[in-house]
Amino acid sequence: MSDFTTSSIPLSPPRVAAERPVSTLRDKSRRRLSAEGPLRRFQNWVNYALAQVPPRFLTPAMADRDAQAMASLSALAGGFRAVLPSLRGYGLTPQGALHLAALVQGAQPRHIVECGSGVSTVIFAAMLRNLGAGGCVTALENDPVFAEQTRDLLRRHRVDEWARVVDAPLAPITLTDKSPWPWYAINSVAAVEGPIDFLLVDGPPGKLRRQARYPALPVFASRLAPGALVVLDDVNRRDESKIVARWQREFGLELIDRIPADKGMAVLRRARA
């Protein structure tokens, strides 16, 4: 668990991606993608590696950056009722969490769906609570132990009213390419009702096979609301970067931002009509 509380950290306003024109975001994203080469891939690898540095090994500058991100996150979410687990290692980073909260602040979705669960589930639920317009988070989790830990976190932060964690064991599914993909069991996915306004894809584990998270769009595309946001984490890994290109090509999603910091995050949007 983290050993700091956000109440003792000076608050600074977050940078909200929604404040920039979509055309600017799109142009920058295209430039980033077109510049993808050995140097960019190396920088992505460095960013991804740094994002997994445990808190005790952070430099003072990195620790200060994390603290400021957590302070801004707490301000956006209306404060947290307990100490959040450390946002380092293999999970969400403080900067990644802040980007997600800012996206929710701008989009104000009614239904958020997560592939995977954890601290992000708590952050989403706290954002919905603070926005005060209702809504809910549905998180699919293949690890039953981790699913129960997330439910416990939701209860401790008193936001379980805004979120539910669905036990979703992995099972092979067949897509149009006829090859089996390890994905969340069909009966679990059936529990996710549409329309979906915001989809975060941070599971299942990328080590299962190449482009392991690709099925998210074949499975959920028909349930996406017009204008829905789709966020793919870990795009500083080559597999996830390829998934972004496939989703754009096969489902007509518009890439509106690609955040290179830390593990990398791609933000896509379904057409409004």
Image (spheres, helix red, strand yellow):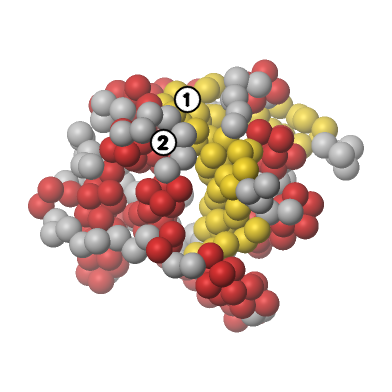
**Viewed as shown, does residue 25 lie left or right of 153?**
right
Whether residue 89 appears in this view of the structure is no
Image position of 218 with respect to 74: above or below: above
Check if mark 2's residue and mark 1's residue have beta carbons within 8 Å: yes
Q: What's under tag 2, amino acid-wise?
A: Thr
SS label for mark 1: strand
Give the residue pinned by disc 1: 165
Determine the residue positioned at 63% across, 73% down: 30
Determine the residue positioned at 37% across, 60% down: 16
Determine the residue positioned at 41% across, 36% down: 121
**Callout 1 crowding tier (Cα within 10 Å): few <14, some 14–19, many ≥20:** many
Residue 143, given in percent of the width and then of the height, sits at: 53, 28
Q: Within the image, what quadrant is residue 154 found in? A: top left
Q: Within the image, what quadrant is residue 262 found in? A: bottom left
Q: What's under tag 1, amino acid-wise?
A: Val
Residue 254, given in percent of the width and then of the height, sits at: 65, 58
Give the residue pinned by disc 2: 121
**Callout 2 crowding tier (Cα within 10 Å): few <14, some 14–19, many ≥20:** many
Determine the residue positioned at 61% across, 77% down: 31
Name the image quarter holding the N terminus.
top left
**Viewed as shown, does residue 255 lie left or right of 50?**
right
SS label for mark 2: helix
Task: Please name whichever residue, 63 or 196, is drawn nearer the observer in this view of the structure.
Answer: 196
Q: Within the image, what quadrant is residue 122 found in? A: top left
Residue 170, given in percent of the width and then of the height, sits at: 66, 28
Q: CA distance from mark 2 to mark 1?
A: 9 Å
Image position of 84 with respect to 265: above or below: above
